[in-house]
Amino acid sequence: MKKNTYNKNNTLEILNLLMNNFISKEEICSYLNIKLPTFYKCLKTIKNAGFEVEKKGIKYSSSKFSKSINFTSLETSIFSYLLFLSYSMLPDKKNKYFYNAIMKILHISTKENYEETILKFESHKKTANDNIFKEKVELLQKYKDNKYVLKIVLHSGKKYILTPLDFHWQNGKAYFYFINQTKRKKMILIDKIEKIIPEDKIEYIPEAKETIFELYGRLAKIYVLKENERIIDSFPDKLVIANGSSDKEVLFRRLLRYDELCKVLFPKEDVKTFKEIIEKSLDNIS
């Protein structure tokens, strides 16, 4: 009796692993501390229960029944909204369980039902994100126009006292530039902001003298900071740098040599000037 219960539990655990992703038998055996004969017995049980077992190379997956369940369009809409609710409340552990449970239901549906549900789910996320962007950007612009210093609270728990400068949209992501109390710029992804709290009203917004630019590819990996420069943000293939040099002409001539591996982001006057320099250079070449 104990052996049957043991085999049953192993079968359910293996099915759970196979439904999440492609995984090798060695990984499953190591994770569940079982031997290969046990794995093959459980795999046979899974197949006999009606699940399709797909194999890619040395890895297995079992994402649905041989005869998939067909849901109505209304049911796919309900599933997509339930997915969105659980997704929007993550990372709570219970919400993750709920999200995974809905996904497992979808895995045994038809391919058409699965794709329809995921498409609706992505649409819910996009609409929510667009509204959040719009609401936060409008709020930041309002506080900027009314000359407020703000307390910015991120989802990570970090807090900053900053003055809003300008909004920037890049590669499908929304950013806002701020200046801190030591007159240094900070670029923050709108997604990361949880709260925007007005603090003190100021008589003026500090003038931002730094030029913000991006470097890409190999140049971003080997670039050595020059005098009056600091890194604002870094990515595997991109570097965001602030340059506080007073001689903009010298700076722009240097950035021009980096060609398509460089882009000036802020302030708007510098973007405009740099663009004019590039256009003038192209005219001289032609």
Image (spheres, grey):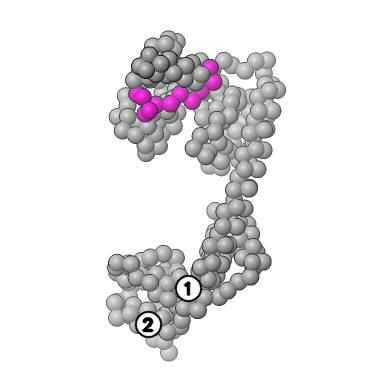
Q: In this view, does 7 lie above or below 30?
A: below
Residue type at mark 1: give it: Lys
Give the quarter of the image for residue 121.
bottom right
Q: In this view, does 224 lie above or below 26?
A: above
Of residue 267 and residue 85, the one placed in the foreground of this image is 267
Disc 2: which residue: 44
Residue density around tag 2, few if under 14, some if 14–19, many if 20 or more, within 10 Å: some
Q: How many labels does the image show?
A: 2
Residue type at mark 2: give it: Lys
Is 54 displayed left or right of 191 in the figure?
left
Q: Is residue 267 magenta?
A: yes
Return the x and y of residue 272 as percentages of the image width and height: 51, 18
Mark 1 vs mark 2: which is more N-terminal? 2
Q: Is residue 94 magenta?
A: no
Of residue 247 and residue 151, the one placed in the foreground of this image is 247
The residue sitting at 41% across, 81% down in the picture is: 47
Residue 64, labelled with which disc? 1
The residue sitting at 58% across, 74% down in the picture is: 70
Helix, strand or loop for disc 1: strand
Quarter that holds the N terminus: bottom left
Is 58 displayed left or right of 62 in the figure?
left
The residue sitting at 42% across, 84% down in the picture is: 48
Quarter that holds the C terminus: top left
Q: Is residue 77 above or below residue 223?
A: below
The residue range painted magenta reads 258-269
Helix, strand or loop for disc 2: helix
